[in-house]
Amino acid sequence: MSKIAPIALTNLTTMRVGGVPKSILRCETTEELYKSALAALNSDEKFQILAGGSNTVFADDVSDLNIILVANTGIEVLEENQTEIELRVQAGENWDEFVAWCIERGYAGIEAMSGIPGSVGATPVQNVGAYGQEVSQVITSIEFLNFESQQVDLKPADFFEFSYRNSALKRDLRGVIGFVDFKLQKLGGLSIPMASGQITNHVKAPYGAQLPLNLVRETVLELRSSKGMVVKDSDPNSVSCGSFFTNPVVSHAKSLEFPKDMQKWEMDNGDIKLSAGWLIENADIPKGFSLPYSKAAISEKHALAIINRGQASSKDIIELARYVQERVAARWGINLIPEPNLIGF
Ligand SMILES: Cc1cc2nc3c(=O)[nH]c(=O)nc-3n(C[C@H](O)[C@H](O)[C@H](O)COP(=O)(O)OP(=O)(O)OC[C@H]3O[C@@H](n4cnc5c(N)ncnc54)[C@H](O)[C@@H]3O)c2cc1C
């Protein structure tokens, strides 16, 4: 466990906003993580768990906040047979490096989630997903320190009530994750059946095809880069939290109120997911839009991403987000829900 001299959270978040916190404690083992969180819980101090900072927007003044930085690493094989492997991955491992590591070894189930920034331990929080895959499909159990009971528990995936971009951890279950257990498939270097038309169309394969794992990764990275969804110093459209709003989910009956040609996806339970990007662009907020004198903007590559064009304050980001919410509510009667965690506002 090491105390780092407090630096502005612009340096520890992909949105590059946020003031200087009171303290930053970097935890390099799971024990350190639990110990630091317990100590913070039993003090009067405000604290926040932070890992890769790719889904967090901090306020400009966080001078009363103590940051617990998740930096525990390690991948362990729990069980393996001819067709499956179970892995235990410490929370601070980088997610995309873990995906690449699995692809190199022929483990399938997370390949379409290539290029998502951040840590392994944050993926269950909002049930990270992309291109037809979600982490909840491959998580078997999670060890976490439950802030209510103050006990460390290894709980099965069901316990976390995963749904689209949501889990009990995002709602009301408070705790810090130490490690995540995954079960992946060994399919001779092939992916699981692809549930994304964007991927299969791109490589001219039928929907549901099993593709070479490397091809899936290359395709996804290409598709994501074209939308500014891979964090790169060279891409100003990637200075963001990815999608700033979740796609709203409505009943089938409600979805009939929207134009036939708008982007929508049917969910397993029959509900309909509407494209938040479409709603934004069709509320007269084009890609690249910015409020006067603001350094925040809608990405030029993706209507759903709010970006920091350089030196934006948290206030700039939040003002633009509110403007988008108001315009979409007025035009479409839909309340867009922010996806990132907004801290200190
Ligand atoms: C360019 C870009 C593209 C993105 N694309 C996608 C995408 O395709 N799909 C998607 O789902 N997301 C996407 N995201 C969002 C983000 O990458 C994910 O939510 C990611 O899992 C966040 O990881 P992190 O380590 O950066 O989390 P942080 O921002 O550090 O934390 C996020 C939340 O998780 C909590 N948390 C972090 N670690 C732990 C832990 N060990 N225990 C308990 N709580 C913890 C934090 O307290 C915070 O509330 C994208 C972001 C960016 C910038």
Image (spheres, rainbow, N blue to C red):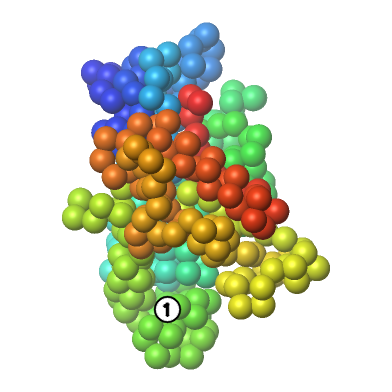
Residue 234 position, x and y percent, is: 19, 55
Q: Is residue 277 left or right of residue 253?
A: left
**Which residue appears at 31% of the width and 47% of the height?**
239
**Which residue appears at 53% of the width and 43% of the height?**
323
Q: Quadrant of the N terminus?
A: top left
**Which residue appears at 42% of the width and 78% of the height?**
199
- Where disc 1 sits, the SS reads helix
**Which residue appears at 20% of the width and 51% of the height?**
233
Q: What is the quadrant of residue 286 in the picture?
A: bottom left
Residue 298 position, x and y percent, is: 40, 52
Q: Is residue 295 something one can see in this rendering?
A: yes
Residue at the limit of the structure toward the right, as seen here: 253
Residue 344 position, x and y percent, is: 48, 24
Circle count: 1
Q: Is mark 1 within 8 Å of ligand 1?
A: no
Identify which residue, 284 or 158, lies in the foreground: 284
Q: Which residue is mark 1?
A: 199
**Looking at the image, residue 116 lies above or below residue 184:** above
Q: What is the quadrant of residue 258 in the picture?
A: bottom right
Residue at the limit of the structure toward the top, as seen here: 44
Identify which residue, 331 or 202, lies in the foreground: 331
**Looking at the image, residue 345 lies above or below residue 298:** above
Residue 8 position, x and y percent, is: 28, 25
Say few, some or many: other residues with alpha carbon within 10 Å of mark 1 (under 14 / 14 to 19 / 20 or more).
Answer: many
Q: What is the quadrant of residue 62 in the picture?
A: top left
Q: Is residue 192 left or right of residue 20?
A: right
User: What type is the residue that disc 1 sits on?
Assistant: Ile
